[in-house]
Amino acid sequence: MPCFNHFQWFNAKSYEKPQRRGYTLCNWELGHTTPACFLRRMSTDMNISHSSRRLRTALSLTMAILVGACAQNPTSPDPSDPESGPVTATPGEPPLLATSVVTEAPVVLRPDHPQTYTVAPGDTLWSIAGRFLQHPWQWRQIWRENPQIRNPNRIYPGDVLHFSYNASGQPQLEVAEREDVPLIKLSPQIRVEELSQPIPPVPRDAVESFLTRALVLSDAQWKGAPYIVADDDEQVMYADRDRVYARGAIFDQARYQVFRPSEPLMEPGSGRNLGTAGIYLGQAVLEKDADPATMVLANTIAPIRAGDRLFPFEEEAELYSFEPHPVPPDTEGFILVNLDPDVTQITQYSSVVINLGAQEGLEPGHVLAIYSKDREVADPVSGGTLKIPGERSGLVMVYKVHDLVSYALVMQAERAIRLRDRVTTP
């Protein structure tokens, strides 16, 4: 497992994310109104003559038409006007803030997509989506779960996928045929497991070590984690088969992972502390839960010391239970770290760290487009400099999310990808 001390860093300027704005009814200064606002203004500004029955009748008819329009035809947002949006208000209450509605982009199919496809070993959700879609991150928009089969939310090797259109004319893909997935009974426990694993969203061998052996935690999280106190022989460093004692939690798992906090991850330019990465050291097998608990070390890859921290294993089913989908609009970040210190270039299936995490709403499966940095070039004719915008250079999919950073896998590399390249909505 590479140490964060050896990751490739860069010098970057801090950036500022665009802020979303709220919009209110009756904003006369903005030069647009809603029917409800028009009614209120008309009722207060106009001086209606009680002596004119015709005028009163005409105005009543006009008011009825406007009220009918309000009830049946809500104001539609103008796509060209960023200030417009569907808004409602209750009489006698202050205007409400409009909520921005995120609409999905139309599905773009590959012209050569098959009508059926039999899933093969080694397939991933990304590769299957790429057989049907121009944009594989639109997978959620076409996938339909078949309630007639067991585990309809999973896809297994041997499944036959069928492409069709629903009653609304929208494309859809579902499992049409499935052979019975072999089951194996494990004794002496009463437990049944599937012999065949569902296909993962991304290649397992590209992300497995980072999924199971990567931590980025805050200082408070590190301080609150259970830890190793000592061994049974007064040694300074411990290795395989050494008995150690631990405390700091109720230990109810059979095995734990051993980590040591490394240096804090500081965001270049802004100086923001993004958390402290953990160095994976090995495993500890629980012998007896007490205070302190007794454990035996196993599968160590580096010496373990007193003070090293213990964390339970995550369920593999949860680690791989995500599918590709685009990040929300206006998501902006950049590539911080290349997780493979032995490779100077970032290529397809490289794992990287980006400076966006759970606090920015990221989740496993989110897909972002990579853009190269803008650059300035000299104008050979008129003199001066000219800004050249960055071009799209690839796609990444997030597979592990921490509070302020995420691990992502490069799914497509269309040109050279470098540290500090921008990642944004595809």
Image (cartoon, rainbow, N blue to C red):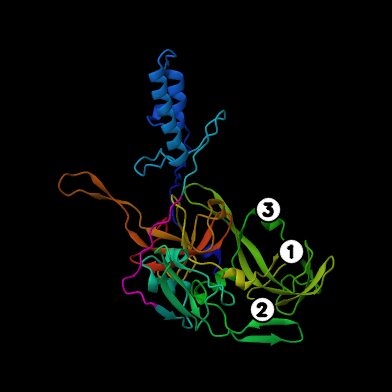
Q: Which residue bears the numbered disc 3?
A: 220
Residue that mark 2 sits on: 299
Q: CA distance from mark 2 to mark 1?
A: 18 Å
Closest to the observer: 78 or 411?
78
Q: Is residue 107 magenta?
A: yes
**Overall secondary structure of the magenta section:** loop
Residue 213 screen position, x and y as percent: 60, 69
Question: Which label number is shown at residue 227?
Answer: 1
Name which residue lies at 22% across and 43% down: 384
How packed mark 1 is, by other alpha carbons closer than 10 Å (few <14, some 14-19, many 20 or more), is many
| Camera-nearest residue between 235 and 363 | 363
Q: Residues within 10 Å of mark 2 (few under 14, many from 20)?
A: few
Total residue callouts: 3
- How far apart marks 1 and 3 lie (CA) works out to 14 Å
Residue 27 seen: no
Q: Nearer the viewer, residue 252 or 73?
A: 73
Q: Amino acid at mark 3?
A: Ala
Q: Which residues are magenta?
A: 102-115
At which x and y percent is residue 409?
47, 67
- Image: 181 above or below 265: below
Is residue 134 among the parts visible in the rendering?
yes
Could you tell which of marks 1 and 3 lies nearer the N-terminus? 3
Q: Mark 1: which secondary structure?
A: strand
Image-based side of 101 in relation to 377, left or right: right
Q: Quadrant of residue 404?
A: bottom right
Q: Secondary structure at mark 3?
A: helix
First-in-chain label (2 vs 1) = 1
Mark 2 and mark 3 lie on one chain; the one further toward the N terminus is: 3
Residue 63 in picture, x, y percent from top left: 43, 28
